[in-house]
Amino acid sequence: MSLAGKRIFITGGSRGIGLAIALRAAKDGASIAIAAKTTEPHPKLPGTIHTAAKEIEAAGGKVVAIQCDIRDENQITSAIEQAAAALGGIDILINNASAINLTNTENTPAKRFDLMMGVNTRGTFLTSQAALPYLKKSAQEGRNPHILMLSPPLSMKGKWFKPHLAYTMAKYGMSMCVLGLADELKRDGIGVNALWPRTAIDTAALAMIPGMDVAFCRTTDIISDTAYIILNRAGKECSGNFFIDEQVLASEGITDLDKYAVVPGTKEFINDLYVD
């Protein structure tokens, strides 16, 4: 497996899972465009596009850092064009940017609803749309293009909607993009898949949720290693899947996952949302 020479566009890649995926690809010498909103340090969330770029370069990758608010369609178009010009094209799109607000219907302000729908569903759709000409060209050149969404498996069980209807709608919007694009782009040979963790992942955003104990979480490395496996599979054959990290790793014979525990030796983890 190798992502050497791959040209990768990652939304929300200044920290957390997006950055972890970028760093894993950088080890192979991939070229990576980081598109995120943060250019100045945030008081609560570490990392900017510039600090991420330095880490990616140190890991061995070529990188271009692009400020982009994924809610703005003009900024999305500009970011994709900048990335393609700087990298010479786009082979892989990682739709990672996400907004979370775990409130019930009565306690979800309109601005929070709009934020989650704008970043998660609309942002994923528009970024995928803008990248399509470059991904189709990548397919024509035999470069095995992929789109990967960090979104959950679809389920119509009421228990996933009841506690936080707006968030579930927004995340499922990303997953519906997987469902539709996988069939739409099958003829083009572009693999479209979703990836979701079985357990909670230790990120800065997760740490902001009240009552969350990261001691019972796994690190972002489990997602980056899983994404690496998926992106190395043939997109023509591997598409339309809603992957769970543990299952992908097991399919490659990786069943000892202790190295991914925030606290080594931990046996019980917090189950992630949308995973039975």
Image (tube, rainbow, N blue to C red):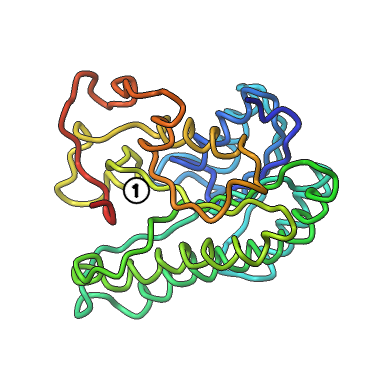
76 and 167: which is toward the camera: 167
Point out residue 109 in the picture as x, y percentages from the top left corner. Answer: 30, 78
Image: 54 above or below 117: above
Query: Splitting the image into 4 quarters, where does residue 254 fall?
Result: top left
30 and 14: which is toward the camera: 30
At x 72%, y 56%, the residue is 80
Query: Splitting the image into 4 quarters, where does residue 116 fall?
Result: bottom left
Point out residue 123 in the picture as x, y percentages from the top left corner. Answer: 55, 66
Q: Could you tell me how many numbered marks the image carries?
A: 1
* Residue 56 in the figure: left or right of residue 176: right
Residue under pointer 1? 205
User: Which secondary structure, mark 1?
Assistant: helix
* Residue 146 in the figure: left or right of residue 95: right
Image: 193 above or below 19: below
Q: Is residue 120 visible?
A: no
Point out residue 113 in the picture as x, y percentages from the top left corner. Answer: 37, 75
66 and 146: which is toward the camera: 146
Kind of residue at badge 1 = Ala
Query: Splitting the image into 4 quarters, where does residue 201 fall?
Result: top left
Point out residue 20 in the picture as x, y percentages from the top left corner. Answer: 49, 34
Residue that sits furthest to the front in the current view: 237
**What crowding class fits label 1: few (fewer than 14 Cα within 10 Å), some (14-19), or many (20 or more)?**
some
Image: 263 above or below 112: above
Q: Is residue 110 visible?
A: yes
At x 63%, y 25%, the residue is 1
At x 73%, y 45%, the residue is 91
